[in-house]
């Protein structure tokens, strides 16, 4: 049997952290990583303003960096935006795209996510494409159809299991401390893999699907043990070094 890949633990710091406090947070995490044997892949997605300082501190730790968004054009008159190449220039390996906060607060539909993902791939970034249903959609038995449509419309040509990770993040679980049951998580992760295998030949070998939404040091082990869960996308709990370390330990 093929060896199971090490879990992927992604920290999404969102719009949090000024330079000094964030570098202190990373200093604490970094020390623990260097003092221990870590059995998972760690990706940290800080605000853009911190990338340069983070890029100086990550070498030798195994920690990879990611952006939280990018524009779909390679360059030009797009005030306030950041390109995929700029993230790559800051040593990022990953970019989060289609997070529900972008979809809902900034009206980003899957077509835009797909264009951004194509630009990210062109700049040699791996995409973490977020999908997930609202509570209304779940209550009305629309969860699978919502996720399917998001998936099929967010993935650009050329997306495959090497350059793309899917994050299943039920919107109702983000920032709420409400977690789906293990059965619900397993069902959706299995569904995502099945849809991609069936609809996209480039995913015939499957795909890494990470779970996101109120993951923390106490529930990480249980979630990571669910069949089909390849890792975690962590918001709030990644802003506390003890809590985040608890997740890394659970994943190791
Ligand atoms: P949370 O956020 O862990 O704070 O619920 C998760 C996310 O938005 O990725």
Image (cartoon, helix red, strand yellow):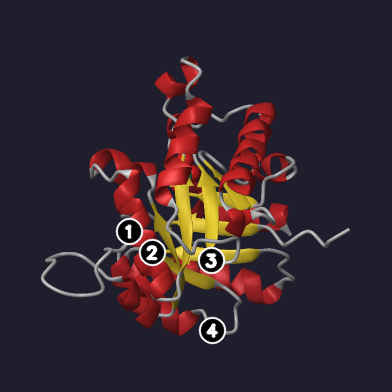
- Mark 4 and mark 3 lie on one chain; the one further toward the N terminus is 4
* Label 4 sits on residue: 59
Query: Does residue 116 lie above or below 27 as drawn?
Result: above
Q: CA distance from mark 2 to mark 3?
A: 10 Å
- Mark 2 and mark 4 lie on one chain; the one further toward the N terminus is 4
The label nearer to you, 2 versus 4, is 2
- Respond yes or no on whether mark 4 lies under 8 Å from ligand 1: no
Q: CA distance from mark 2 to mark 4?
A: 27 Å
Q: CA distance from mark 3 to mark 1?
A: 15 Å
User: Looking at the image, can residue 245 be seen?
Assistant: no
- Respond yes or no on whether mark 1 lies under 8 Å from ligand 1: no
* Label 3 sits on residue: 163
Q: Residue 161: give x, y in percent of width and height.
A: 60, 60
- Respond yes or no on whether mark 3 lies under 8 Å from ligand 1: no
Q: Quadrant of the N terminus?
A: bottom right
The label nearer to you, 1 versus 4, is 1
* Label 1 sits on residue: 115
- Mark 1 and mark 4 lie on one chain; the one further toward the N terminus is 4
Query: Does residue 199 lie above or below 14 as drawn?
Result: above
* Label 2 sits on residue: 118
């Amino acid at each position: 049997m093929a060896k199971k890949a090490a879990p992927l633990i992604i920290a999404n710091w969102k719009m949090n952290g000024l330079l000094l406090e964030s570098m202190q947070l990373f200093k604490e995490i970094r020390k623990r990583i260097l003092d221990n044997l870590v059995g998972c892949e760690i990706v940290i997605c800080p605000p853009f303003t911190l990338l340069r300082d983070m890029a100086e501190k990550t070498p030798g730790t195994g920690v990879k960096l990611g952006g939280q968004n990018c524009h779909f054009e390679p360059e030009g008159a797009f005030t306030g935006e950041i390109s995929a190449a700029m993230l790559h220039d800051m040593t990022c390996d990953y970019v989060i795209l289609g997070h529900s906060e972008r979809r809902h607060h900034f009206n980003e539909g899957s077509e835009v996510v797909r264009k951004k993902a194509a630009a990210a791939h062109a700049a040699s970034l791996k995409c973490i494409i977020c999908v997930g249903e609202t509570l209304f959609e779940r209550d009305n038995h629309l969860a699978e159809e919502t996720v399917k449509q998001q998936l099929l419309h967010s993935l650009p040509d050329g997306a495959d299991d090497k350059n793309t990770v899917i994050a299943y993040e039920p919107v109702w679980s983000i920032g709420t401390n409400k977690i789906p049951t293990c059965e619900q998580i397993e069902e959706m992760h299995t569904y995502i893999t099945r849809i991609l295998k069936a609809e996209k030949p480039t995913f015939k070998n499957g795909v890494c699907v990470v779970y996101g939404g109120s993951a923390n040091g106490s529930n990480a082990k249980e979630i990571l043990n669910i069949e089909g869960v390849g890792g975690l996308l962590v918001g709030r709990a990644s802003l506390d070094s003890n809590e985040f370390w608890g997740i890394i330990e659970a994943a190791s």
